[in-house]
Image (cartoon, rainbow, N blue to C red):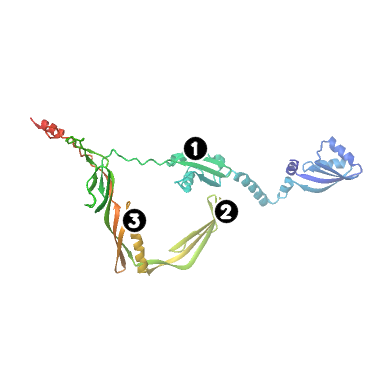
Amino acid sequence: MKKLMGWLFGLVTVRVTGAQPEDFLNLCARENLLLWRMVRLDPFTLEVQVTGRQYPWLCRLAERTQCQVREQRRRGLPFFLKRFRRRYALLAGLVLFVFLALAGSRVILTIDVTGNQTITNEEIISQLRLCGVSVGTWGPSVPIRAVENKLMLAMDQLSFCSVNLYGTRAEVIVREVDPDPDLREEEVPTNVVSAATGIITQIEAWKGDAQFKEGDTVCQGEVLISGQVLLDPPPLVETDLGTMLVHAEGRVFARTWRTLTAQISLTAQGKEYTGETITRRCLSVMGQRMKFYQNSSVPYEKYDIITHLRSWTPVEGKTLPILWETTTYREYTLTERQLDPGQAEQLLRDALEESLLASLDQGKVLQKDFTVSQEGDVLSVTLLAQCDEQIGRLREMDTTEKVVGPRHPDKGEYPQDETNTKEQSP
């Protein structure tokens, strides 16, 4: 601690030579002059240390005791800064360095996000920027609770959010909302209808009455499993209980045939680079870009942009917001080129197969055939596929339909019909 205080105040080491050095020491004690260190080199010479501010005082006391003072060395912060008293640029740089060192420790340089599963870090950091927290934000000025509330209101996918500041690092801890359970609207009457024309290979009626059986041919839009269910009477009772509407459910697999067609022109425009390029560089510090070029316009009509970003990573896994950006502009012209028919055909085949697989619902492709035709520069590929797929789709029933009630046990009529008959009779 004493060394640190001496460096802050600045120490001067001097040699005091005289016939009676003891008189000098006695005078320093009477005048309360603090000597940081004192070494007797010989009977007539002392080596002492005093602060820079007390050095002129020591010289006056030595003169009163008829002693000679010779300065040996100076060290400490005041003497170091004194070197810059006429070098204003260096002094300004030193002051700026000290300011940045003190202030930079409270500026947010990195943002870490933890706890997210389906939401990306970029989405959270982007929304956090809209709430007032980003790289380069002054940490002490961040209203943490207000930022947390804004982030929760802005992102419905979050159930919990916490923002913590640790010097230059901001930590964002989130918890996502649990997904809502898949609730089936079983109270809504529905039918299971056919999404395609085909031959039924398997039918499973979980709820409702099946209208077809295996081996039957169905057309698109026909009702496969009806939600209007006929109520069965109890055993040994021959009574018509009518019908009721239910939420029909089930799976219906059928053999279907699909035809898909795709076309492509064998004449296309391709890029041909001229060899002319322009390279521009800039430095981005905490989102502020410093350009090292003047004219930002590009003299080319058609060009590609290639951007390389290099970041400063002093510690593995920790990237500071300092980016060196190099952008290259390459000029090109468009020229007509002939595509290889074989490659074009394979491209269309792959696209048709991907489209076919994407359209199937719980099914598989049993057989597929391709036909290729060319008319001028247009190449056409047709896919004929035989599939086994699930064709049942839920469709809400017309709610205007009424449930048929039971027949009258004696008259053999519906109660509603009987009521209407009575109302119509004079």
In this figure, which residue is indicated by the disc labeled 1?
A: 146
- Where residue 312 is drawn, which disc sits there? 2
Mark 2–mark 3 CB contact (< 8 Å): no
The image position of residue 45, as x and y in percent, is 88, 45
Residues at marks 1 and 3, CA–CA distance in whole angstroms: 49 Å
The image position of residue 413, as x and y in percent, is 13, 35
Residue sitting at x 63%, y 46%: 101
- Where residue 270 is drawn, which disc sits there? none
Q: Bin the neighbour count of mark 2 within 10 Å (Cα to Cα): few under 14, some 14-19, many 20 and up.
A: few
The image position of residue 158, as x and y in percent, is 45, 41
Q: Is mark 2 on a helix, strand or loop?
A: strand
Foreground residue among 59 and 405:
405
* Left or right: where 247 falls relative to 309: left
Residues at marks 2 and 3, CA–CA distance in whole angstroms: 46 Å
Mark 1–mark 2 CB contact (< 8 Å): no
Type of amino acid at the residue the image marks with label 2 = Trp
Q: Is residue 261 visible?
A: no
- Where residue 357 is drawn, which disc sits there? 3
**Closer to viewer: mark 2 or mark 3:** 3
Q: What element carries label 1?
A: helix
Foreground residue among 39 and 65:
39
Q: Is residue 410 placed above or below 305 in the rendered structure? A: above
- Whichever of callouts 1 and 2 sits on the residue coming sooner in the sequence is 1
Foreground residue among 158 and 54:
158
Q: Can residue 179 be seen in this view?
A: yes
- Whichever of callouts 1 and 3 sits on the residue coming sooner in the sequence is 1
Residues at marks 1 and 2, CA–CA distance in whole angstroms: 32 Å
Type of amino acid at the residue the image marks with label 1 = Ala
* Left or right: where 282 falls relative to 35: left
Q: Indicate the quadrant where residue 140 lies.
A: top right
